[in-house]
Image: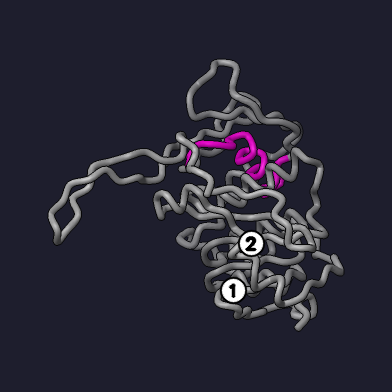
Amino acid sequence: MAEAPPYAATNVRVLRLPQGSAEEDAVAVEEPLEIRVGGEPLAVTMRTPGHDEELALGFCFSEGIPATSAAPPADLAANTVEVEAAGFDRARVQRSFYTSSSCGVCGKGALEAVSVEAAKVESRLAVPASLVAELPERLQQPTFEATGGLHATGLFDPRGELQCLREDVGRHNAMDKVIGWAFREGRLPLADAILCVSGRLSFELVQKAAVAGCPLLVAVGAPSSLAVDLARDRGITLCGFVRGGRVNVYTETWRVQA
């Protein structure tokens, strides 16, 4: 098994009860990342260090920011990425950070906002249910194995071959890193790909998949009601509770063939 990268995990002392032993335990690293555009701060996200430029690019792509590249800033500030982008409405982007479950924006407004940023997914990709059922087992998560504290997103081709995997304390960050990788590799839109996540399916993850043009989103956990609504609206096949050979298909069921 691959080891967790040293920047993603650190050791702390822990008291284990009821045996009363004090030991070293690995925990996932969580630090802030400031994303700058045009030299000005745009957003701060709490993330696990690593693949920060991919994270910034994926975040910008998901928010409709026409980014072209990402790199450390000229002042070499720690935990900061500078994104090159031209001609975007900063005020609109900052108003559009509606996707967390505590934001208070109504579902109808959120769906309308995404429909502006993401065209309906028209991909004709279809795969066997047996392949979908195997995808969570193909998520290689070395830092999760070491810490138990990270989410993962994997990008798979139609044969179920893993193309890219990223881990992070934030499930949305893990997906942003994968989308940022795909952006750098010239693979967007993801019309012939499958995204698989290690946890539940929130509205935010479906939104990111929609903007990336991915037709099939798979999760070990459950979807939310708004995630199902958005997937149906954007033509995405949503599969949840994919574990133990079982697959629940909530939308666009024709893409998963029994």
Question: For the C terminus, which image quadrant?
Answer: bottom right
> Observer-nearest residue: 62 or 9?
9
Q: Return the residue at label 2.
A: 196
Q: Residue furthest front?
A: 1
Q: Secondary structure at mark 2?
A: strand
- x and y, in percent, of residue 111 in the image: 66, 66
Q: Secondary structure at mark 1?
A: strand
Picture quadrant of residue 59: top right
Provide the residue span drawn in magenta. 48-65
Kind of residue indicated by mark 2: Cys
Residue neighbourhood size for the residue with mark 2, other residues' Cα within 10 Å, grouped as few (<14), some (14–19), many (≥20): many
Q: Residue furthest top?
A: 75
Q: At 50% from the left edge and 21% from the top edge, which residue is drawn?
A: 77
Q: CA distance from mark 2 to mark 1?
A: 10 Å
Residue neighbourhood size for the residue with mark 1, other residues' Cα within 10 Å, grouped as few (<14), some (14–19), many (≥20): many
Residue 242's disc is 1
- x and y, in percent, of residue 113 in the image: 68, 59
- x and y, in percent, of residue 256 in the image: 75, 77
Dominant secondary structure of the residues highlighted in magenta in the image: helix
Circles 2 and 1, Cβ within 8 Å, touching? The answer is: yes
Instruction: Please indicate, yes or no, whether residue 116 appears anywhere in the rendered image.
Output: no
> Observer-nearest residue: 182 or 78?
182
- x and y, in percent, of residue 184 in the image: 75, 38
| Above/below status of 81 relative to 17 | above
User: Would residue 43 appear left or right of 154 to someone viewing this image?
Assistant: left
Q: At 22% from the left edge and 47% from the top edge, which residue is drawn?
A: 14
Count of all numbered marks drawn on residues in the image = 2
- Asked whether 9 falls inside the magenta stretch, the response is no
> Observer-nearest residue: 111 or 120?
120
| Above/below status of 153 relative to 221 | above
